[in-house]
Image (cartoon, rainbow, N blue to C red):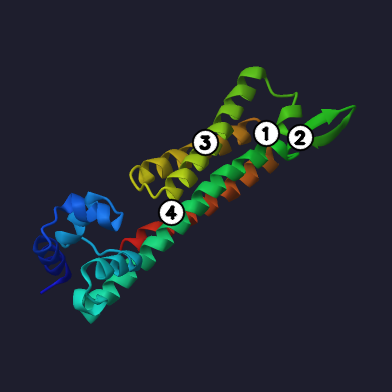
Amino acid sequence: MEFHEKLQELRKNHHLTQEELAQSLFVSRTAISKWESGKGYPSIDSLKEISKFFSVTIDDLLSSEELITAAKTENESNILHICDLLFGAVDLMSITLMILPLYPQSMEGSVTSVNLFAFGQLAFPLYCVLCFLLIALCCLGMSKVLLNQIKIEKGRNILNCVSIFAAILTIFFLIFIRAPYAAAMAFLLLIIKAVLVFQMPKVHN
């Protein structure tokens, strides 16, 4: 008998609904439904709670092969959360494109570097566009970090795509206004995000 069958049998023998079991284990009903349908395994912590709740051992719940699969799934999930957190942190670093002296400005016949707020050579409409892009990236980063902390996975791919698209637009815009240092830094942040996105699909394999 496989894990999902054992869990379903234990729940029914204790005359519990999926909702009641979920409340007892402090997980969502969707999680119980997923486990009972054989579409996934609980984390090691959840397995401990299940074994404690039903007064059985983890070995009674899982075969050796299933235990290895559960451990692998949890490890992959942890890697995914780390990648998500780093991705959000990189987007938050977009604020450095506003506060660091990365923009060239002519002053009394010489060229100096200033931050975005002191970049007076940029027309107001263009200044607003650049600020909007950078603030949008920071907001996306904050959203990624918050969703990661409360473990909401829906919309991850959409946020990643929007973030990468906004980063590409920012780079082209910085090139257009002739801010090479800022463009180089924005490109570096984009490369880091691309590496993280490349790692994320491996988590699902």
Relative image position of residue 51 (x, y in whole percent):
25, 70
Q: In the picture provided, is 73 more to the left or to the right than 30?
A: right
> Helix or strand or loop: what does disc 1 sit on?
loop
Which quarter of the picture shows residue 201? Answer: bottom left
Q: Which mark is residue 178?
A: 1
| Local crowd size for mark 2, using a 10 Å CA cut-off: few (<14), some (14–19), many (≥20) | many
The foreground one among 198 and 1 is: 1
Q: What's the amino acid at mark 4?
A: Val
Q: Is label 2 in contact with label 1 (beta carbons under 8 Å)?
A: yes
The foreground one among 71 and 186 is: 71
Sequence-first tag of 2 and 3: 2
- Mark 4 highlights which residue? 197
- Mark 2 highlights which residue? 104
Q: Which residue is drawn at 49% across and 46% down?
A: 145
- Mark 3 highlights which residue? 139
| Local crowd size for mark 4, using a 10 Å CA cut-off: few (<14), some (14–19), many (≥20) | some
Q: Which residue is drawn at 24% across and 54% down?
A: 22
Sequence-first tag of 4 and 3: 3
Q: What's the amino acid at mark 2?
A: Pro
Q: Which of marks 2 and 4 is in front?
A: 4
